[in-house]
Amino acid sequence: MEWGPTPFEGISIKVLYEDKAQGETTCLLRWEPGATLPMHKHAAIEQSYVIEGSFGDHDGICRAGEYVWRQPGSFHETYSEEGAVILAVYRKPNVFKNSSGYGDDA
């Protein structure tokens, strides 16, 4: 299983499970030091477990061995100063801002 690119510089993905019809994904995300994920909305619960390194947002830093989840409708921008590998479980894809606000064509 190979690491693949994402639309975000410094972040690569290894998909472990995907149901495109339902929008569900379980994946590993590899963050290079200094990588950021722009402001986005969670359409459904997101769960993340940090395997190595750390990542954070306005609520704080999540380090190796820690778990964090985001409730549906929440917004945040995430970053990793040192790099990280994260196990992420999405019930629906994140929604990123586009020219008309937050929507599917981001």
Image (tube, rainbow, N blue to C red):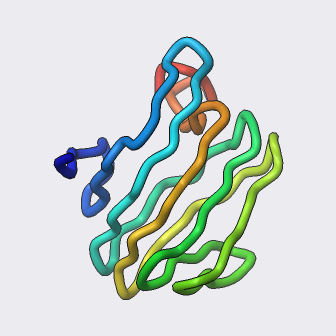
The residue located at (54%, 66%) in the rendering is 78
Quadrant for residue 76, please give it.
bottom right
Number of labelled discs? 0
Horizontal and vertical percent position of residue 99: 51, 27
Q: Residue furthest top?
A: 21
Near-viewer residue (43 or 68)? 68
Quadrant for residue 21, please give it.
top right
The residue located at (59%, 48%) in the rendering is 89
The residue located at (28%, 54%) in the rendering is 12
Left or right: where does residue 97 sit relative to residue 5?
A: right
Quadrant for residue 83, please give it.
bottom left
Horizontal and vertical percent position of residue 57: 63, 72
Horizontal and vertical percent position of residue 2: 17, 48
Left or right: where does residue 28 sit relative to residue 41?
A: left
Left or right: where does residue 24 sit relative to residue 30?
A: right
Horizontal and vertical percent position of residue 4: 21, 45
Q: Is residue 71 above or below residue 10?
A: above
The residue located at (74%, 76%) in the rendering is 59
Q: Is residue 60 above or below residue 20?
A: below
Q: Is residue 7 above or below residue 77?
A: above
Near-viewer residue (13 or 57)? 13
